[in-house]
Image: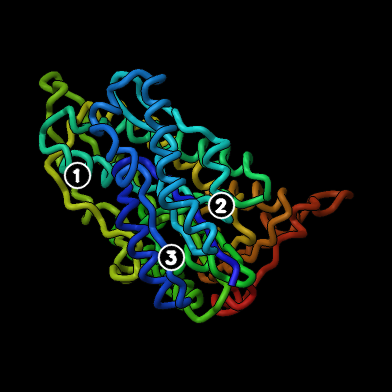
Amino acid sequence: MVAKRVLFLGQTGVSKKEALGNLATYCKKRYDRDCNVIDFDRDFLCGRVPQNAFLDANFRTQRREWLDAWDECFQKAIGPLMKKERDIFLGLHGCYTRSQYGSRCVIDLKKVAQFQPTLVVTLIADVYDMWWRTESRAKGEAWRGMPTLEHLIAGRRSEVMVADLIALECTERIDSLVIAASHPCDTVAKCIFGTDPRLVYLSFPISEPRRQEEKGDLSGIEAVSNLIRLAHEKQKSDTDLAFICPLAIDELPLSLKLPPPDDKETEETPFTFERDKLRWDLARLWPLDERMTKPAVPHGPFRIQDIRKAAGSIYTDVGWRDFRLAEQADKLAVFNPIFPGRQTATRGVANEVTFATAMGRPTYVYQDPALDPENLCDKVWLTGYGAGTMGQSPSAKNIKREKTIEELLKSL
């Protein structure tokens, strides 16, 4: 068997250690592979110098400490396992976060590339979960590290960028995937050990079902949740199929439920975020014991002005993140792009399909006829009806309409 060496990056608060441990356990059970987990920062970097001393040092000192720790890690752990052709899951921070410098990268890309990863994965998580984890770990002592929501979002963005740079530095062409740690273990395991893995991005309306829910209509929520459950069942029965779901990250409720500001609001005004009430319920989608990580235990209220400062970043991250998830997929599975009262597909879905099909991604679409009695899905959006003498755009030819949800999933 060819050894797999997977590099996992992830911002502080993602719970990378938990994710890698659960993933390794799953891969042993599912594929009978003994995956050796190495946590570079915990096992080597922090073993040389106290974590707070390293985080507070100037960037040249950080670089020197990082290089010494990497050489030790390569000599004692990575190198021997590579010689024995063992499977390795290597956890690494691509950047470090501190209030005095924000997000900083001091790693040596060329040295990391010597690990010769077969895949690079950046694990991401909801920013409120990351904040709760880091606050709980700090126990009120700032020297342990108490990043703000803004710091965590900046760090998350930087992790993705560093992961891409590492992938480009490798001599062999490898993928750099962004995957939420709340996905089932099977999703990432397929990408690692699948014989011919097919990564499919699930594209569907999110805001429209929520607006329906506010009016007391749960049909949209239930329909989308049912699709994801069926996709998960299909993933488990197929040896090489993996689905990426955008709802594995669901941050907008944190900022959208803020009350209007008033004169009494200060930097310390508390705000309690009811995650289990406002977030799309992941229990509708995947069993808890199948996920790479469990949700964080809420650790007190947020500071309301911290959320206001981060709100713009939370909103803009939705766009680039969903485009990235669509870009890294091999195919798109699109569900109910038309909702009642609309003359075209919901904007998010339409943008994802336009983006993906322009890059040549095969896209399969199911539209519930009851939600689209005028067949706008075909007439306006899919077939280029009324497009004139030039007919369909080349990208529209990458779209195929399916008559049932079962046919949609079967076609993938």
N-terminal label among 1 and 2: 2
Q: Secondary structure at mark 1?
A: loop
Residue 35: mark: 3
Give the label, 1 or 2, closer to the camera: 2
Q: Which residue is mark 2?
A: 117
The one nearer the camera, 405 or 44, is 44
The one nearer the camera, 359 or 116, is 116
Please indicate whether residue 236 sits to the left or right of residue 333 in the image: left
Query: Residue 69 lies in what quarter of the image?
Result: top left
Please state the horizontal and vertical placement of residue 392, each as a whole percent of the image.
80, 54
Please state the horizontal and vertical placement of residue 320, each as a whole percent of the image.
52, 40
Considering every residue shown, the one lying at the far right of the view is 389
Q: Which residue is mark 1?
A: 273
Please state the horizontal and vertical placement of residue 368, each as a whole percent of the image.
53, 70
The reply to whether residue 245 is visible in this rendering is yes
Residue 227 vertical placement versus 390 (above, below): below
Neighbour tally class for label 1: few under 14, some 14-19, many 20 plus, Cα within 10 Å: some
In whole angstroms, how far apart are the C-alphas of marks 3 and 2? 14 Å
Question: What is the three-letter code of the residue carrying label 2?
Answer: Pro
In whole angstroms, how far apart are the C-alphas of marks 3 and 1? 37 Å
Give the label, 3 or 1, closer to the camera: 3
Q: Secondary structure at mark 2?
A: loop
Q: Residue at x 40, y 32 (%)?
A: 66
Question: What is the three-letter code of the residue carrying label 3?
Answer: Cys
Q: Residue at x 61, y 64 (%)?
A: 374
Please state the horizontal and vertical placement of residue 252, each as a whole percent of the image.
35, 43
In whole angstroms, how far apart are the C-alphas of marks 1 and 2? 39 Å
Please indicate whether residue 135 sits to the left or right of residue 364 in the image: left
The reply to whether residue 349 is visible in this rendering is no
Neighbour tally class for label 3: few under 14, some 14-19, many 20 plus, Cα within 10 Å: many
Please indicate whether residue 303 sits to the left or right of residue 351 in the image: left
